[in-house]
Image (cartoon, rainbow, N blue to C red):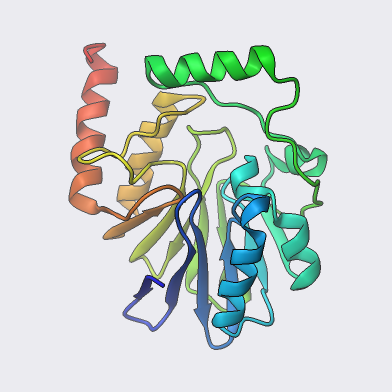
């Protein structure tokens, strides 16, 4: 199980990988879970949490309301008596248990979204869950015992958020991907301009490593190069 430790001793465990990454942030017997994976991985998620001897989760943070991030939210909330936090603009999706499809950022992903929207009535439906905390632009996690905060990083969805831990590591949801070599650009986003602006906000945190929900960690150097390149493309209109 991949693990990172900040200079202040906060541990970040990559509890699940593959289809959708799930991260556990831990210090002094306090636990924050970031995202939940799809429902079909619930057994594996439960086994990994047992392996880490996790009996309590103080807070579940959903980076956004898509099914592959939120489908196990109701189960986590009830099994671990966890509070559930999500950006205020996506709480209604979580309460209804539905996914709003983002647009595609390339011809193939654009075709895929159009195809799904046309032929599937309710894509990404899942068990609904009521939220307990609503995030806005910034939310401190000090009350939970962490030197960390939630930062609004829209673009993939309007309510996408990232979690900044000890100003060293950022858990960024789908604000970027770690799948494509030499690129952090996601195949899906509702607003590419906002997404690139969110990369700038993430660079301003001073974090050195960015942990996405899909793929491997991205370095600061890679994000900085991608931010400058995409910013220039948006400014000039040249791709």
Quarter of image, res 132: bottom right
Horizontal arrangement in the rendering, residue 162 relative to residue 236 (left or right) = right
Quarter of image, res 192: top left
Residue at horizontal 36%, vertical 65%?
167
x and y percentages locating residue 88 in the rendered image: 69, 43
Residue at horizontal 59%, vertical 53%?
37
Is 100 above or below relative to 17? above
* Front-most of residues 13 and 132: 13
For the view shown, which residue lies furthest in the bottom direction? 28
Quarter of image, res 179: top left
- Tally of marks: 0
The answer to whether residue 108 of the structure is visible from this angle is: yes
Residue at horizontal 77%, vertical 38%?
92
In the picture, the quarter occupied by the N terminus is bottom left
x and y percentages locating residue 164 in the rendered image: 44, 60
* Front-most of residues 126 and 62: 126
x and y percentages locating residue 27 in the rendered image: 51, 83
Is 54 above or below relative to 69? below
Residue at horizontal 43%, vertical 47%?
214
The answer to whether residue 206 of the structure is visible from this angle is: no
In the picture, the quarter occupied by the C terminus is top left
x and y percentages locating residue 131 in the rendered image: 77, 53
Is 119 above or below relative to 80? above
Horizontal arrangement in the rendering, residue 213 relative to residue 97 (left or right) = left
């Amino acid at each position: 199980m991949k693990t990172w430790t900040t200079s202040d001793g906060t541990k970040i465990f990559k509890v699940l990988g593959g289809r959708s990454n799930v991260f556990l942030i831990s210090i002094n017997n306090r636990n924050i879970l970031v995202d939940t994976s799809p429902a079909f991985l619930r057994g594996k998620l439960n086994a990994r949490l047992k392996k880490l001897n996790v009996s309590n989760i103080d807070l579940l943070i959903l980076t956004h309301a898509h099914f592959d991030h939120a489908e196990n939210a109701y189960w986590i909330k009830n099994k671990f008596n966890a509070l559930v936090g999500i950006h205020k603009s996506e709480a209604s999706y979580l309460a209804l248990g539905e996914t709003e499809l983002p647009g595609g950022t390339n011809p193939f992903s654009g075709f895929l979204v159009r195809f799904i929207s046309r032929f599937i009535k309710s894509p990404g439906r899942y068990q609904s869950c009521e939220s307990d905390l609503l995030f806005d632009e910034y939310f401190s996690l000090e009350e939970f015992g962490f030197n960390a905060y939630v930062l609004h990083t829209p673009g993939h969805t309007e309510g996408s958020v990232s979690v900044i831990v000890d100003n060293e590591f950022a858990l960024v949801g789908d604000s970027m991907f770690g799948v494509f070599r030499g690129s952090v650009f996601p195949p899906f986003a509702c607003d590419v301009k906002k997404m690139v602006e969110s990369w700038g906000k993430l660079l301003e945190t001073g974090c050195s490593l960015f942990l996405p929900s899909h793929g491997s960690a991205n370095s600061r150097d890679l994000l900085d190069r991608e931010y400058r390149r995409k910013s220039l493309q948006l400014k000039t209109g040249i791709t």
